[in-house]
Each structure stands twice: as structure tokens, then as C-alpha cells.
């Protein structure tokens, strides 16, 4: 396993509350080093997080529909009024690159999981999303041109 990791210098990790949900190593053909300090890195991490969020939203709708009963009248007393952000669960998506033998985080984004039902957020399965996420990162980090952060700051 160690030898495989050495051949694949790029990885993404999805966490919930600092616990790894998914971690994958991969290669990028034509990696452009200037992508690391670019404005576009924000777009890449946003796109990857949106892939996960869309999946969680879909699974939330499926879960809610499964337990919805239109024949039961909801009373005022049945409504749960607790603050859903009282004990917040956070998802973190991290993109890492190996640089001179050391894995370095180049992008990380956090989003709240509390808008999804506990049953959905605690049973995350993104196996079918992995190719989309890796493809998004590969395309994003192998572009020819990037907007460097220094260019924006100097204007």
C-alpha cells in the first residue's frame, strides 16, 4: 500500500467531525504547479463540495419522502422546535498534494451537515461520487492558465 501511495501524489479527503469518511489517492496528468496559489483553487474546492452537497440533498429528499405520510395531520405540538445548530456536525473536504515528499493541504472547505437529517449525514456513502470528484480536481489542477492571487492583490 505504501508503494501505491508514493506513485499517486494527489489526494482528497472527506471528513465529518474530523473523522474520515472517504480518502482517495490519484494522479493528475499535466499538473500545473501554479494552480496551487491561484484563485481557481477556490472554484475547484467549491465544485467538489457542491457534488457532495447535491448528493446529500437528494438522499435527504428520498429519506423524507420514504417517511412522509400525507394521511396524518401534523399538530403544532408535533413540530420539533429545537435548534438544529446546537450540536453542529461539520463536513470538511480537503485536497492535498505531495510536494518534495511531504503532503501539503492546498484547499480545504467546511460546511455544516445539520441541514441534513441525522440518518442521512451519519450514513454518508459517496462511492459513486468519487470519479466525479477526482475528475473535477484533475481538470481544475491541469489547466494551462490561472489567475494568481498576487495579480489580484496588486491591482
Image (spheres, rainbow, N blue to C red):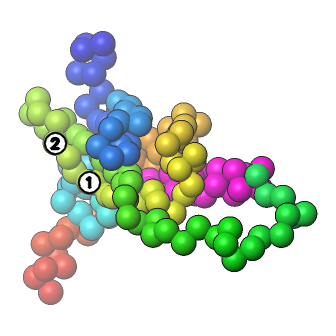
Quadrant in the picture for the N terminus: top left
Confirm whether the magenta stretch covers residue 55: yes
In the displayed structure, 36 sits above or below 27; it is below
Residue 115 x/y as whole percent:
51, 63
- The residue at the point 25 percent across, 42 percent down is 96
Where disc 1 sits, the SS reads strand
Relative to 116, is 70 on the left or the right? Answer: right
> Is residue 36 visible to the viewer in this orientation of the structure?
yes
Q: Which residue is mark 1?
A: 107
> Is residue 145 visible to the viewer in this orientation of the structure?
no
- The residue at the point 84 percent across, 58 percent down is 69
Q: Nearer the viewer, residue 61 or 99?
A: 61
Residue range of the region highlighted in magenta in the rendering: 44-66
In the displayed structure, 12 sits above or below 115; it is above
In the displayed structure, 152 sits above or below 127; it is below
Residue 121 x/y as whole percent:
51, 48
Q: Nearer the viewer, residue 7 or 25?
A: 25
- The residue at the point 35 percent across, 36 percent down is 20
Residues packed near mark 2 inside 10 Å, few (<14), some (14 to 19) or many (20 plus): some
Q: Main secondary structure of the magenta part?
A: helix
Q: Nearer the viewer, residue 123 or 86?
A: 86
Residue closest to the far right: 71
Residues packed near mark 1 inside 10 Å, few (<14), some (14 to 19) or many (20 plus): some
Q: Which residue is mark 2?
A: 104
Proximity of marks 2 and 1: CB atoms separated by less than 8 Å: no
Where disc 2 sits, the SS reads strand
Confirm whether the magenta stretch covers residue 67: no
Relative to 116, is 145 on the left or the right? Answer: left
Residue 64 location, quadrant: bottom right
Relative to 49, is 31 on the left or the right? Answer: left
Relative to 118, is 15 on the left or the right? Answer: left
Amino acid at each position: 500500500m505504501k508503494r501505491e501511495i508514493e506513485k499517486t501524489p494527489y489526494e482528497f479527503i472527506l471528513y465529518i467531525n474530523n473523522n474520515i469518511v472517504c480518502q482517495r489517492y490519484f494522479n493528475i496528468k499535466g499538473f500545473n504547479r501554479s494552480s496551487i496559489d491561484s484563485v481557481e483553487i477556490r472554484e475547484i474546492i467549491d465544485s467538489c463540495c457542491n457534488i457532495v452537497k447535491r448528493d446529500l440533498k437528494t438522499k435527504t429528499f428520498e429519506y423524507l419522502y420514504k417517511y412522509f405520510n400525507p394521511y396524518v395531520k401534523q399538530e403544532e405540538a408535533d413540530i420539533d422546535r429545537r435548534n438544529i445548530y446546537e450540536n453542529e456536525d461539520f463536513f470538511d473536504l480537503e485536497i492535498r498534494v505531495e510536494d518534495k515528499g511531504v503532503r501539503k493541504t492546498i484547499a480545504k472547505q467546511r460546511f455544516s451537515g445539520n441541514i441534513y437529517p441525522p440518518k442521512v449525514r451519519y450514513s454518508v456513502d459517496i462511492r459513486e461520487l468519487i470519479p466525479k470528484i477526482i475528475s473535477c480536481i484533475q481538470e481544475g489542477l491541469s489547466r494551462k492558465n490561472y489567475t494568481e492571487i498576487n495579480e489580484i492583490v496588486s491591482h
